[in-house]
């Protein structure tokens, strides 16, 4: 079964690699394409990796990728290079590593780039069907934090929650959803329009810092629910607290292996101590069917595997079989 890569990915990769990449076959999709200077290309799948040993990446290949990313203007990518990643159309992210330039004890930019990590974004309709009923209570959505390590599917899960809420489910009508998409990964807007299915009642602030965007949406679009990805800074925390005071539910994500590890991060301690979050969704990188839904006390309240409820039309053990019936 041939798995063709999206054009947004192929256009930044030197053409001499296209035939090999486009002929990759198998039942598992590529999650990452790791390109390192003077090394073979590495393909990362969910539970394994392999190399395209026939090709070695050259310095010229690296220049080609960087020129495609920047449209031949490195100045255009100055902020992205400082952050260490570039977001492509479609929500794909290209991580960058190499020699950094440090100014005033902070990274100004990555100057000599030696590695690219292309992380493919994919839409998985219905992946959050089994959790949504635990996030809604007494006519309103609950403040929810999705926790998981890198590559555990946090953004994919958050995106599907946004779709369900903005579409409605069961006897629950669609609610107004505001998305602050700082990295253009949730909605993947192109020309102002989302490239993903997100329902009918959503509004997006694209490429907008979360801390500013949350309050902008509250003032201008009166959302019922705010969706933001990867919170972590003190400014993010303050914005979430302001949203709470305005009576708006927040669904967001954070990097961590589990709730216990998250409690050790200083910027989350106040939110957790005050029981700001009513629900926690814990994702597992190695076993993505192992999903926990915890209440504010950290108790697992989700269905046991194999049980069903009115929204669970999918084969929970295989996301590729998920059917959208919302």
Image (cartoon, grey):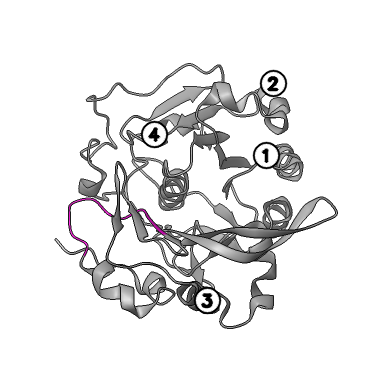
Question: Which residue position holds label 1?
Answer: 247
How far is mark 2 from mark 1, CA to CA?
20 Å
Mark 2 is surrounded, within 10 Å at the Cα level, by few (under 14), some (14 to 19) or many (20 or more) other residues, namely few
How far is mark 3 from mark 4, CA to CA?
44 Å
Q: In this rendered view, identify the residue nearer to me: 164 or 63.
A: 63
Location of residue 172 (image quadrant): top left
Question: Which residue position holds label 2?
Answer: 273
Question: Which residue position holds label 4?
Answer: 131
Q: Are marks 1 and 3 in contact (CB under 8 Å)?
A: no
Q: From the viewer's perspective, is the residue at label 4 or at label 1 nearer?
A: 4
Q: In percent of the image, x 23 and y 48: which residue is there? A: 320
Q: In percent of the image, x 36 and y 44: which residue is there? A: 169
Q: Secondary structure at mark 1?
A: loop
Question: Which residue position holds label 3?
Answer: 63
Mark 3 is surrounded, within 10 Å at the Cα level, by few (under 14), some (14 to 19) or many (20 or more) other residues, namely some
- Relative vertical location of residue 153 with respect to residue 72 in this rendering, above or below: above
Q: Which image quarter holds the N terminus?
A: bottom left
Q: In percent of the image, x 36 and y 61: which residue is there? A: 40
In primary-sequence order, the first of circles 2 and 1 is 1
Task: State yes or no: residue 26 in magenta.
Answer: yes
How far is mark 1 from mark 3, CA to CA?
49 Å
**Percent from the top left, x then y, of residue 118?**
44, 60
Location of residue 81 (image quadrant): bottom right
Q: In this rendered view, identify the residue nearer to me: 226 or 234.
A: 234
Q: In this rendered view, identify the residue nearer to me: 167 or 293.
A: 293
């Amino acid at each position: 079964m041939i798995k063709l890569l999206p054009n947004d990915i192929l256009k930044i990769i030197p053409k001499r690699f296209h035939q090999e990449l486009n002929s990759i076959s198998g039942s598992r999709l590529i999650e990452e394409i790791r390109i390192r200077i003077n090394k073979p290309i590495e393909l990362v799948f969910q539970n394994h990796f392999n190399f395209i040993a026939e090709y070695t990446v050259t310095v010229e290949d690296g220049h080609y990728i960087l020129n495609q990313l920047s449209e031949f203007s490195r100045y255009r990518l100055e902020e992205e290079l400082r952050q260490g990643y570039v977001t492509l159309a479609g929500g794909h992210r290209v991580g960058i590593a190499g020699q950094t330039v440090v100014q005033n004890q902070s990274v100004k930019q990555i100057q000599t780039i030696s590695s690219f990590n292309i992380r493919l974004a994919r839409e998985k309709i219905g992946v959050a069907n089994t959790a949504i009923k635990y996030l809604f209570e007494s006519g309103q959505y609950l403040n929810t934090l999705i926790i998981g390590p890198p590559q555990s599917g946090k953004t994919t899960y958050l995106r599907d929650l946004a779709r369900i809420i903005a579409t409605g489910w069961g006897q629950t009508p669609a609610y107004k959803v505001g998305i602050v998409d700082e990295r253009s990964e949730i909605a993947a807007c192109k020309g102002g329009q989302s490239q993903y299915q997100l329902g009918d009642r959503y509004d997006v602030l694209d490429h907008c810092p979360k801390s500013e965007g949350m309050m902008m949406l509250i003032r201008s679009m009166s959302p019922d629910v705010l969706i933001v990805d990867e919170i972590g800074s003190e400014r993010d925390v303050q914005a979430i607290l302001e949203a709470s005071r305005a009576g708006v539910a927040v669904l967001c994500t954070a990097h961590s292996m589990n709730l216990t590890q998250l409690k050790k991060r200083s910027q989350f301690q106040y939110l957790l101590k005050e029981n700001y979050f009513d629900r926690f969704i814990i994702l597992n990188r190695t076993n993505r069917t192992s999903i926990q839904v915890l209440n504010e006390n950290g108790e697992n309240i989700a269905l046991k595997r194999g049980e069903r409820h009115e929204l669970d039309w999918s084969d929970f053990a295989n996301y590729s079989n998920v059917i959208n019936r919302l």
